[in-house]
Image: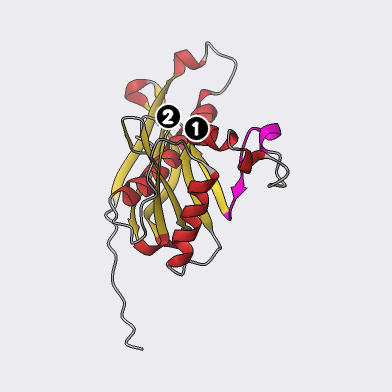
């Protein structure tokens, strides 16, 4: 069979999410800020992991054809085309995900093929969300300082992929520590992460472009 293997390199980067809680400021409120910060820090590190994966996909060269934006928002036709492209590469119809942003969700919610009970069992317009469609589980990326999905003008680069196609290498898993810093008379809540991402199989993802204003 002449099977061969290729090493993929994920470059790990160090990330911190620190925040101080002053002992005097803490006495002015009736809640424990350190507990609130722990949840906030966990969310920040989670968004950073998302961005590492998005950046790795942006840097890749997918084997499948990019689904072009044209003059349309995200539609059922584009989702179906992404599924066809992946299946043409022999990608199994399991662990499939779609990463889009809010306007892309709006495009699907305005597409009768995605919302009508004549075509779908899920009442998307009632719940205001689309969980799964054409085998894909949808992840909605909000506007975020970490970067989010790449946009050029009004054209958004979204990604439809199988989970094993993209790897996330973790050197230090997400963790939060709270330490007393005497010099600052404050507690330091700090989250740490050492991680990197790389596309393992460029045949397992498709870039789907859409006009978010259409």
Vertical arrangement, residue 137 with respect to residue 150, above or below: below
Q: Position of residue 135 (x, y in %)?
A: 58, 56
- Residue at the image point whose x is 52% and y is 34% from the top: 107
User: Looking at the image, is mark 2 or mark 1 nearer the viewer?
Assistant: 1
- Residue at the image point whose x is 42% and y is 67% from the top: 89
Q: Name which of mark 2 and mark 1 comes first in the sequence.
A: 1
Q: Is residue 126 within the magenta segment?
A: yes
Q: Secondary structure at mark 2?
A: loop
**Residue 200 seen in render:** no
Categorize mark 2 by other alpha carbons within 10 Å: few (<14), some (14-19), many (20+): few
152 or 118, nearer to the observer: 118
Give the CA separation, mark 2 to mark 1.
8 Å
Q: Is residue 28 left or right of residue 181?
A: right
Q: Which quadrant of the figure has residue 8?
A: bottom left
User: Which quadrant would the C terminus be assigned to in this image?
Assistant: top left
Q: Are marks 2 and 1 in contact (CB under 8 Å)?
A: yes
Q: Position of residue 113 (x, y in %)?
A: 62, 43
Q: Position of residue 33 (x, y in %)?
A: 52, 23
Q: Secondary structure at mark 1?
A: helix
Magenta span: 124-135
User: Which quadrant would the N terminus be assigned to in this image?
Assistant: bottom left
Q: Position of residue 83 (x, y in %)?
A: 50, 57
Residue under label 2, please give it.
143
- Residue at the image point whose x is 56% and y is 23% from the top: 32
Q: Which quadrant of the figure has residue 151?
A: top left
Q: Which mark is residue 87?
A: none
Residue under label 1, please give it.
102
- Residue at the image point whose x is 40% and y is 23% from the top: 186
Q: Which quadrant of the figure has residue 48?
A: top left
Q: Is residue 144 left or right of residue 34?
A: left
């Amino acid at each position: 069979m002449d099977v061969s293997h290729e090493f993929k390199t994920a470059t790990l980067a160090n990330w911190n999410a620190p925040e101080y809680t002053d002992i005097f400021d803490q006495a002015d409120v009736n809640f424990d800020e350190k507990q609130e910060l722990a949840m906030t820090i966990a969310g920040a590190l989670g968004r950073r992991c998302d961005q590492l994966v998005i950046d790795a996909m942006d840097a890749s060269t997918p084997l499948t054809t990019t689904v072009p934006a044209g003059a349309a928002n995200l539609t059922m036709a584009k989702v179906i085309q992404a599924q066809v492209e992946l299946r043409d590469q022999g990608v199994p119809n399991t662990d499939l995900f779609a990463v889009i942003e809010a306007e892309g969700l709006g495009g699907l919610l305005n597409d009768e093929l995605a919302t009508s009970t004549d075509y779908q069992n899920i009442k998307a317009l009632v719940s205001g969300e689309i969980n799964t469609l054409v085998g894909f589980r949808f992840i909605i990326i909000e506007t975020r300082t970490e970067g989010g999905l790449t946009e050029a003008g009004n054209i958004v680069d979204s990604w439809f992929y199988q989970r094993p196609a993209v790897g996330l290498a973790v050197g230090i898993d997400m963790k939060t520590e709270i330490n007393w810093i005497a010099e600052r008379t404050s507690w330091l809540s700090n989250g740490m992460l050492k991680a990197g991402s790389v596309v393992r199989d460029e045949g397992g993802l498709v870039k789907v472009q859409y006009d978010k204003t259409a």
